[in-house]
Amino acid sequence: TQCRRAAVVCSAERKVDVAAVAEKTFNDVVPVPKESTASVHLGERVGGTKCKDSIVTPIVQSATYTFKDTQQLVDFVEGRYESFEYGRYGNPTTRAVEEKLAGMECTDDALMSASGMCSAVTMLLALVPEGGHLVTTTDCYRRTRQFVTTFLPKMGIGCTVIDPADMDGLEEALKAHNCSVFFSESPTNPYLRCIDIPKVSKMCHEHGCLVCIDSTFSTPCNTKAAVLGADLVLHSATKYLAGHNDVLAGALAGSHEVIGKVRQFHNVLGGVVDPHAAYLVLRGMKTLDLRVQQSNNNAMHLARELEKHPKIVKVHYPGLESHPEHHIAKEQMRGFGGVVSFEVEGDLKKTSDFIDALTMPYIAPSLGGVESLVEQPTIISYYDYTAEQRAALGIKDNLVRFSCGIENIEDIMADMEQALSIL
């Protein structure tokens, strides 16, 4: 009681409106939080789902939601009452992730789904009409390429594939076709090419074409694709957002209008993320900025050391001056990401021997987790392709993709050195 009285007296002397201060929210005090603050608090601090006075957003494991009476249901349908109706259309835990991601990407809204590919497929089917056309880039995730070149043609949808730096090719495609979407990763997989997002966005918007950037390799901590002009930002939330190799999820961020169109189609297809999986993404995102910074630093150090190594033929990393889009990466990335691709001196067998000699990274087809992962794309992703087919895609037998985790860089380098010594 004495402490409270003293506080009131002190506040009066300083002419502080105690009531006004008490009514301030986190959003009032920190309207534009920095990355590490945003990753912890957005989507949860104000207006988020809570159980009593819990700090942690709960897992709402419910397939359906109730209304106290018909009038409340009518109010919900007509937009006067905020709630949820059915699990395929939304979930409080999932919504917290969507709001956090939208805040970090500086967009109006976001939509979670069951996987990154689910987000990509739903987005393309929702936005590209039958008989339509899209533009994508040569260096990309194999399953994305497979969908746009194998499945979409069945719907009469055409696709122009260009080099990430081919702006003349993009202009030709935009003039020759009624393009609905330009879709590319940045950085791309596995050669980490970077799209000039402001330039591509300007060119596409002049022709009424939406731009979707898959920012999985970059994260909102390194690149704000929407701020740079993109209409949509896609993530395999399995990777950096969740960050612990323990969940499958996808996400798409953008304007209310465009996300609304995708959400309508998503509600029909039903590729929803499970509430527990959504919670794992939510928990992982709290440390996103910290993990990304460590991965950035590890990858930058690794890339520089490998570039000097006599048994490395070439290093692909946007943070290096030798990278073809380094000038673009410097302008639009805060950090250059945690993935480094490089070519060792040797053939398919020697490259495999090198990977097998590594003791720290797991041989696995993913990235963005706290553990370092390594893969040989020829074997893990393109083993069913002929040598000629791989060559046409630029996939070399001696190519290695290394996803840096958050381990100590000295330990990563020591392991790398001993493995390279066998070549």
Image (tube, rainbow, N blue to C red):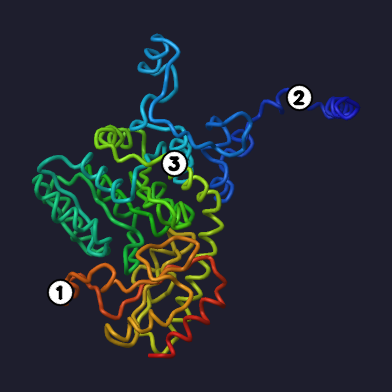
Nearer-N-terminus badge (2/1) = 2
Is 382 located above or below residue 272 in the figure? below
**Closer to the eye: label 3 or 2:** 3
| Local SS, label 2 | loop
The residue carrying pointer 3 sits among few (fewer than 14), some (14 to 19) or many (20 or more) residues within 10 Å by Cα, namely many
In the image, 293 versus 379, the foreground residue is: 379
Q: Position of residue 391 (x, y in %)?
A: 19, 75
Nearer-N-terminus badge (1/3) = 3
Q: Quadrant of the N terminus?
A: top right
The residue carrying pointer 1 sits among few (fewer than 14), some (14 to 19) or many (20 or more) residues within 10 Å by Cα, namely few
In the image, 412 versus 299, the foreground residue is: 412
Tell me the amino acid under the disc marked 2.
Answer: Asp
Specify the label residue 17 is tagged with: 2
In the image, 81 versus 366, the foreground residue is: 366
Tell me the amino acid under the disc marked 3.
Answer: Ala
Nearer-N-terminus badge (3/2) = 2
Q: Looking at the image, which residue is at 30% across and 81% down?
A: 398
**Closer to the eye: label 1 or 3:** 1
Residue carrying label 3: 102
Q: Looking at the image, which residue is at 58% across and 39% down?
A: 56
Is 390 located above or below residue 251 in the figure? below
